[in-house]
Image (cartoon, rainbow, N blue to C red):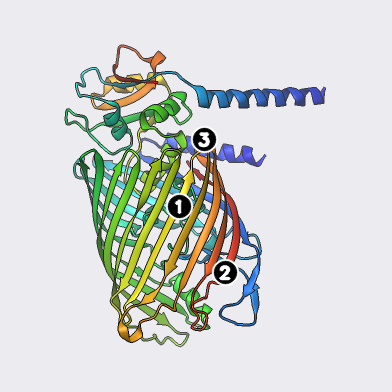
Amino acid sequence: MKIVTLISAILFSTLISTAVNADIKLSGYGSIIAGKTLGTVDDPLNPGQKRDEILTADFYDVGQYTNDITFNAESIFAVQGVADISNNLRITAQVVAKAVDDFQPEFDWYYLTYQASDSLTLMAGRRNIPMYYYSEFSEVGYAYPWMRPPSNLYWWQVTQFNGIHAMYDFELGDYSSTLTAFYGNEYSNDNVEMLYYDKLYGGSARTVNEFWTDIAGVNWNISGDNFDVRFVYFQNDRDRETIQQDGSIDDYTPFSQTFIGFGGNVDLGQFKILFDWNLVDYDDARGTEFPTYLVSLVYNYDDYQPYLIYSKADHKRTKTSSATEDLEEHYISSVGLRYNFLPTASFKVQFDHFIDQGDKATGWAYHGDSDTITAGVDFIF
Amino acid sequence: MNSQFKCQKWITLLFLFIANLLFINYSTAAVVVVVHPENNSTFDKKSIKKMFLGKSKSFSNGRSAILISPDKSDPSRNAFNKSVLGKSSNQVNAYWSKMIFTGKGVPPQEMATASDIISAISANKDAISYLDAAAVTDAVKVVGTFN
C-alpha cells in the first residue's frame, strides 16, 4: 500500500512537472534514512559517566544518531524549480527541508545563471561553497554511492554563501575541463553547529553568529572517459560573535584561512576509486591546520554497488610556541551497499566504525567512538 | 478460487520479473542518433558522448546543440546509455542529478514517443536525439548507429 502511495506521489509530481514544463521545470531529490548507534562509551567530556555512542552524520545542522533508532538525523526532501527568463538567462531556486530542522523549508540555493557563450557561464546568488569534492551535492544522496560523504571531513559550520561564479569550459587535449572562479560572503547568524559546541563544553550562550567573508578562490575540474578530478583553492576571513544571555559578546580574534584540495574518481573496469585530500590552514597565532583525506573503493555489479570508505581528519598547531598534535583526530571505516531498485531510486545500507583518537585530557576527544548502522532510500524526480 | 487467483497473480508477477531481467540485460535493439537533414556537422561516438553528457555544447558547424532524449522508461535510452555513454542508466541519472542540482548542466529535454522526437528534430536545425532504429523515418538524418 505504501509503495502504491509512493508511486502515485511520483506520478503526480511527474504530471505537475509536465504540465508546467513550458515555464518552470520542477525536479527534486530526497533521502529517507533510519539508523542507530550500537553501544555505549565513557563520556569523553564527563569521565566516569557512560553515555550512548553518538555519530554526527550532519555537522552543519547537528543531525546525530544515538541508541534510539531515528529517521531524523539525515532524512531530507528538496524541490528545485528552474525558470527560463530568456534564451540565455535562467533562475534556479532550491527549497530544502531537513528532518533535523523539523522539515522547515529553506531556500538553500537561489541564483541567476547567465549563459554568456557556449563556454562561459556566469552565476550570481546563493549556492554551496565548492570546498570538498562532494560539497556542492553532498545532500543529493542519489548522486554518489555512499549513505553520505564521510561526516568527519564534511564538518564545517558554514557550507553556503552568497556570491558570484564564472565558469569557463574548454578542451584540454582529449579531456574536458572547467575552470571556475568564485567570490562571496556568508553571515551565518544563529549558527546551529557553533551553538552546539558551546553547550557541549558547558556554555550557555544565547546564540553564536559565524562570519566567513571575502571567500575567493578557484575550482579546476578535468574529466576524461574514465576519470573526473578537481583541484580547489580558496581563502576567506573568519570572525565569530558568541552572544551570552546578558547580551555580552565574547572576545574573538579574527583570522584568515586557506583551503586547498584535490579529489575525484577513477574508473578501473568494474571498480571505481573515489578520493579527496584537503588541507585547511589558519593564519592564527597557533598556526592551526586541518589535514583530511578520504579514499573509497566501489565495485559495480549490475544494480549492486558494494563499497568501502576510509576517512581521516587531523588537527595540528604548527607555530613553535604552541606546536602540538594532541588535539582533534579521528577516522571512520565504513562498509556499505547501494542497490538501484529503480532507475531513479536506490536503497542503501551502511555500517560506520568511528574511532576518536583525539586528546582526552584537553577535551579534544569529544566525539567518542561509535558503531552505527543506517539504511535508507535515495531518490530523484 | 481465491488461492488460484493469488497463484496466477504470482506467476504473472514472476513472469514479468523474469521478462524485465531479460529485457534489461539482453536488449540488443540498435539505436540511431538523428539530427536535422541540413545539419552537415561531423559526428563520431566520442563527440556524441561529450554532447549527451553536456561536456561539449556545440556541433562542428559551430551552432549550439539542443539535446533531446527519450523518456527514462524508453528501452532505447538504456541501450544508448550502455553503448554510447558506456554507463548504466542509474550511473547516467546519478551523473545528471549532480549536474542538475548544482546548476552545472541542463539535461536533454525528454520526449515521450519516437514520433515526437522525429517531428522535433525535423523542425529544428540544431536539435539532436536518438531512437530505436526501427522507428526512424526520412524526415531526419541518421549520423550514427550503435548496438
**Label 3 or label 2, whichever comes before in sequence order:** 3
Q: In which quadrant of the rendered view does residue B116 lie? A: top left
Q: Can you give x and y, in whole percent of width and height, for residue A358 in the image?
A: 49, 75
Residue at the outermost left position: B62
Q: Which residue is mark 2?
A: A369
Q: Secondary structure at mark 2?
A: loop
Residue type pointed to by label 3: Asp
Mark 1–mark 2 distance (CA, rounded to whole Å): 21 Å
Instruction: Determine the residue positioned at 70% across, 23% down.
Output: B11
Mark 3–mark 2 distance (CA, rounded to whole Å): 35 Å
**Label 1 or label 3, whichever comes before in sequence order:** 1
Q: Which residue is mark 3?
A: A302
Q: Secondary structure at mark 1?
A: strand
Q: Which mark is residue B25?
A: none
Residue type pointed to by label 2: Asp
Q: Residues within 10 Å of mark 2 (few under 14, many from 20)?
A: many
Residue nearest the observer in this picture, A127 or A42: A42
Direction from residue A321 to residue A38 in the image, left or right? right
Residue at the outermost top position: B138
Residue at the outermost right position: B1
Q: Can you give x and y, in whole percent of width and height, for residue B24 in the image?
A: 52, 26
Direction from residue A52 to residue A231 in the image, left or right? left
Q: Residues within 10 Å of mark 3 (few under 14, many from 20)?
A: few
Residue nearest the observer in this picture, B30 or A334: A334
Instruction: Determine the residue positioned at 36% across, 24% down.
Output: B130
Q: In this rendering, which labeled residue sits more in front, label 1 or label 3?
A: 1
Q: Which residue is mark 1?
A: A296
Q: Can you give x and y, in whole percent of width and height, for residue A74 in the image?
A: 53, 57
